[in-house]
Amino acid sequence: MNIALIGYGKMGKEIEAIAVKRKHKIVLHVEKDNADLVTENDLKRADVAIEFTTPQTVVDNLKRCIEANLPVVVGTTGWYDHFAEIEHMCLQKKSALFHATNFSVGVNLFFKVNKYLASLMNKYEEYDVNMEEIHHIHKLDKPSGTAISLASQVIENLERKNKWSITDKGTDTLFIKDVRDGEVPGTHIIRYQSDVDNIEIMHKAHNRKGFALGAVLAAEFLKGKKGIYTMDDII
């Protein structure tokens, strides 16, 4: 499979290493220095694009891939205010998009555990809940996309919480403590606390390899398809 890598930072390099190991070929590297020079014909050399850039550039990158009818896997977060626009464009152009706030298989299993636990805790009002997410100092969005996904699951299943915040600790608010520290790949913790005990679940990434593998698996899945897909289509 021929892959276009849009974004070639630490994550892009991890994706490249895994893709090559799995016998794929990187036919295009798009970085900030050459992004304006990449043409539609350049993009069409690939079977699938994998996009890991910044919240400021991701929407334009997705539009360029869709216009080129190039299936695209997007791991950048912080752009979901534009999701409806990108979804409409993708379906209209009969292209393909695979999106996820986190491509780690472990994190996506953790999503399912989080959702189930929140549904169990709904009837136990003596437990309050809060979250903590820890990432490296280079991460631009706060809270992380993964934290927002986890928070949304809690809110959907826990009637006493109707919003999340990184500043507000009100009784109807799910507070998310966001920490940026060193080179931490990503840690997410959900805590239920009462006067008598605590219940806590955590996912802690050891490195970026799990995220990179998931992105390559998504690209393998997406090749030749049309429509909108998520990790639920793989897990």
Image (cartoon, helix red, strand yellow):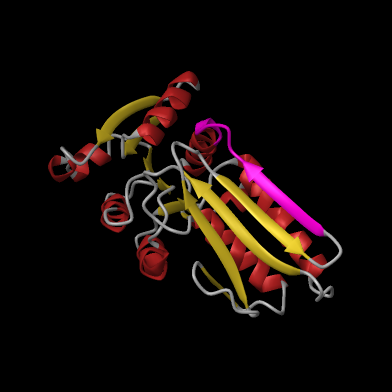
Check the picture and name the quadrant holding the N terminus: top left
- Using the image, determine if residue 69 lies above or below residue 34: below
Where's residue 121, x and y in %?
Answer: 80, 68
Q: Is residue 77 above or below residue 2?
A: below
Q: Position of residue 54 (x, y in %)?
A: 32, 50
Nearest the camera: 22 or 208?
A: 208
How far across and how far down the image is residue 11, in percent? 40, 35
Residue 1 shows in the view: no
Left or right? Give the position of 192 relative to 146. right
Q: Is residue 113 left or right of residue 53?
A: right
**Residue 159 visible in this rendered orientation of the protein:** yes
Residue 109 horizontal side relative to residue 151, left or right: right
Give whichever of 130, 203 is nearer the camera: 130
Does the magenta portion include 16?
no
Classify residue 44 by image quadrant.
top left
Residue shown at 53%/41% (left/top)?
Answer: 221
Residue at 36% from the left image edge and 44% from the top image edge:
138
Q: Residue furthest right?
A: 196
Query: Above or below — where is 118 with respect to 113?
Result: below
Determine the residue positioned at 47% across, 59% down: 143
Q: Is residue 139 left or right of residue 27?
A: right
Residue closest to the far left: 37
The magenta segment is 198-210
Residue 194, position in %: x, y?
80, 67
